[in-house]
Amino acid sequence: MASLPFSATSFHSTFICFNYKARNPNLFFLKKGSSFTFSRRKFIIKSVASDQRQDLKEEGQITEEASLDTFVPDSASIASSIKYHSEFTPSFAPDHFELPKAFKATAESVRDSLIINWNATYAYYEKINVKQAYYLSMEYLQGRALLNAIGNLELTGAYAEALKKLGHNLEDVAREEPDAALGNGGLGRLASCFLDSLATLNYPAWGYGLRYKYGLFKQYITKDGQEEVAENWLEMGNPWEIVRNDVSYPVKFYGEVISGPEGIKEWVGGEDITAVAYDVPIPGYKTKTTINLRLWSTKVAPEKFDLSAFNAGDHAKAYSEMKNAEKPRSSCSLGRNRTMILCDDRDLELWLAYCLYRDSVVTLSILTSTELSSLDTSKPFNLSHLKICYILYPGDESLEGKTLRLKQQYTLCSASLQDIIARYERRSGEFLNWEIFPEKVAVQMNDTHPTLCIPELIRILIDVKGLSWEQAWNITQSWLLVVVDCSYINGDLSTRTVAYTNHTVLPEALEKWSLELMEKLLPRHVVIIKMIDEELVQTIIDEYGTEDLDLLQEKLKQMRILDNIELPESVAEMIAKPEKSSVEAIESTEEDDVSDEETEPTAEEDELEEEEIEEKNEVPPIIEPDPKLPKLVRMANLCVAGGYAVNGVAEIHSEIVKNEVFNDFYEMWPEKFQNKTNGVTPRRWIRFCNPDLSKIITKWTGSEDWVVNTEKLVTLCKFADNEDLQSEWREAKRRNKVKVASFLREKTSFIVNPDAMFDVQVKRIHEYKRQLLNIMGIVYRYKKMKEMSHEERKASFAPRVCIFGGKAFATYVQAKRIVKFITDVGATVNHDPEIGDLLKVVFVPDYNVSVAEMLIPGSELSQHISTAGMEASGTSNMKFAMNGCILVGTLDGANVEIRQEVGEDNFFLFGAEAHEIAGLRKERAEGKFVPDPRFEEVKAYVRSGVFGPYNYEELMGSLEGNEGYGRADYFLVGKDFPSYIECQDKVDEAYRDQKRWTKMSILNTAGSYKFSSDRTIHEYARDIWRIDPVVLP
């Protein structure tokens, strides 16, 4: 148990009385009196834990079953705790209790409660030495934590009342919290949902990630479109994290591999940094289980700082080691005769973070007061010297950007695996046995970013722990999974540690790293990857033999980890000298039996025969590297080869993974491949963000059980036609829409009518997600409105507010053009007096979790319109459906399963299907595609300049032509456009019948029961990790 906080005892109350009578067993608080003034005063500080234990023992209140963590606070004790933190753990001046200070003190008060359960959780896991899952992800898109934490602790009402006593509103205080900038899109949001479910379901697990100082970026929308600035979310500190200065690990880059005694490899030289742990508690809902998200930050050990050089005035030399992991020196040039003079380190960090977003190479120099007029801009600054944990996904167009990304990925993998292994050793004690390591550890790689944990695990086991290659390889991966009735029978449990979740079918997203870069940065790992590749090549040869060399060559080309690299010598020799086949042996015997009466061959015939023999004995090269192409390491292939399980994240996606993306692997190891359809946590995404709807669901289902058993949502189906339910449902939706309208006015200055349909598409901006199709449809709608009279417009179109949100990656030019296009259309439409409230177009800047929590409850139609076969799953579609929002979409990702569950009549479907896409692209390449006249009409309208002077030729041109980069409408916007606008006509028709629309909305919520992350986590735990829930006593 954690130590109790110190407390003040002399300002009108004392921390002496525990509220022990409450039934909630989750935590304790200290109770104080009811006077709440914040004038400065003298305090007497003492630790009261021992006094309170003694008091309770004297009163006979402590039993073997009860302990201090069985106490639950009331509003008075919460208020005292908040006041205590405002005085004794301050980050602000003591004179005032404004909202920022109120948030910080409130969060620290909640954290006290979490720490008790947090410590108890892991003390118990250590005690029973339970098998634990470890989730490695480059992203965790958590959102704000305050309301989620107190909601899971069932303390929302008590905290609201306490803050009211202190002069503040809980919602106002919660809005002071910045979103944790640790992720960008669905990958990070999924990881955070999984942590919530793991804690709620009492599964022993940890998350591992990186502590990004500036996240991705903060997005502004200006007349020029999207602009990016550094998102300084840690500027005021993070009250939820605890730095573990005693938990740190060395991480090495560069250097060389040498052979030691008995051929043992040793990685020496290079640069070393230190990864330091920052822990964030993740509470479960209505449970004491509180799991951990461990985030790594990097620094350089003090001994790397050259104090002698610094004192001698050679500051550059003194900092040369430290700047690799931390930060560069203190000024920069913008180039092109523009200079930025940076006042302090913070200015420098913000500017360099911006450069990373844009993948810019900036120039640095040291400035003194006498050098400002002669700024040295001659030396380009190497981006790989930036702090590793500055930002998420630095631009990777340059070598420096690629190097930094690879450093980030390896830092995550190395620090996490060292930590996992240290924990295993500590729990094993004197009974350490590496053969049972996979019985205690399951590592899940969330996409290909953590792939390096495969060679890193092998490196640690061999180089540090002294295991053989065979032992380390068997511990890492498995060939021996057999599926029987959804359970696994394992020939050898010691060969199951690392598993891989695939999240994409886009070729560019299946990471490939330059072998040259990896050899420089991680030389030891390249040696290990080559050994894994050799193991894989041997397995492929064993599977397919060497008789059909064309087949073998094709399999090796598709399946090898190393691309455009010659075969290992041992394998090449084996193929070059194949064993004599039985047919060849028979032919040889027949030749020996030829009659001696045959005539002797001529000299010319001898020469021809020798040439034929030489030609017959020649073996065509299986792998012939092309010197014009780069040598690559294919990380996804390494994941499949080195992992014991591979899963997709939706049924259709998993089929594409098996039949297209990794078909050759699936044919060889079908038992490795599974589906685990994604899910989202119903706590954050209904219960806490949509309290009005939650109350209705609880009323009509009979209890709050649906929050952890979403199957209860199906109960709503039998009431879908009930007029009372429909009336309550519509009222709740409208209240949420009023909130959204107010939010849009605050963020964008646009005024929208809450009685119009709220049509929302919020997600990362990407061509395959087809925000372009949406805005082209809106342009078509606007053009038709302009051609009609006022009466015709009202009769033809339902009023609609079209809301967009999402970030375009800073170097993704086409995505940024789409953002610019949307905002230009909005600027024109929203100021058109003829259209008025019949159509509005709003782009919400800086879309994040908190914005989603506002928009989703008030949405009525949501667009999930990616090109079929290109979205792995999607999770926002699940959040919208849970909140009674009707989807318009293609048969892509989880849309397929959502449509099955909510009913075909309650989903607006359009567009080509996944199996048609390849044929449609071929048709386009052959010049056979004929665009719909309405689509051509819209393009011409855009080019007419009606939406402003910006030149949209590149954007419109991408939808034209039959072939070429950036041409030929690769994502089939033109093909699906007719089907899309006809589908939108059906949407208008349905919306006019509000009784029908409300029933559809209710059935969407009812059918969303399947898409809880609780269900997904149960499947991972059962089928992949083989872990069981552990309920704290």
Image (cartoon, rainbow, N blue to C red):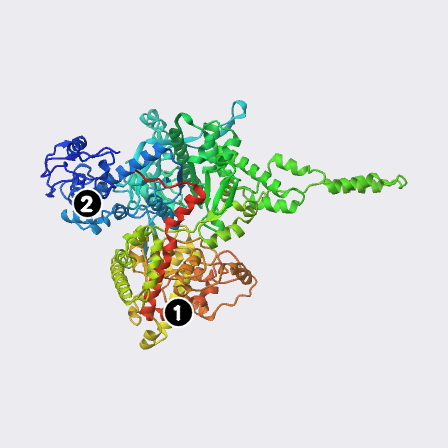
Q: Is residue 315 above or below residue 172?
A: above
**Are the residues tagged 1 and 2 within 8 Å (C-beta)?**
no
Label 1: state its secondary structure: helix
Q: Is residue 282 left or right of residue 520?
A: left
Q: Identify the disc placed on residue 102.
A: 2
Q: Which callout, 1 or 2, points to the residue nearer the camera?
A: 1
Q: Identify the disc placed on residue 669.
A: none
Residue 703 position in % (x across, y down): 28, 54
Q: Is residue 334 left or right of residue 975?
A: left
Q: Amino acid at mark 1?
A: Lys
Q: Amino acid at mark 2?
A: Ala
Residue 199 position in % (x across, y down): 33, 43
Q: Residue 731's image quarter?
A: bottom left
Task: Specify the farthest residue to the top.
Answer: 261
Q: Nearer the viewer, residue 232 or 89?
A: 89
Do we see residue 786 in this rendering? yes
The residue carrying mark 1 is 986
Q: Nearer the viewer, residue 130 or 305?
A: 130
Mark 1 surroundings within 10 Å by alpha-carbon count, few (fewer than 14), some (14 through 19), many (20 or more): few
Q: Is residue 989 above or below residue 652?
A: below
Point out the image quarter for the C terminus: top left
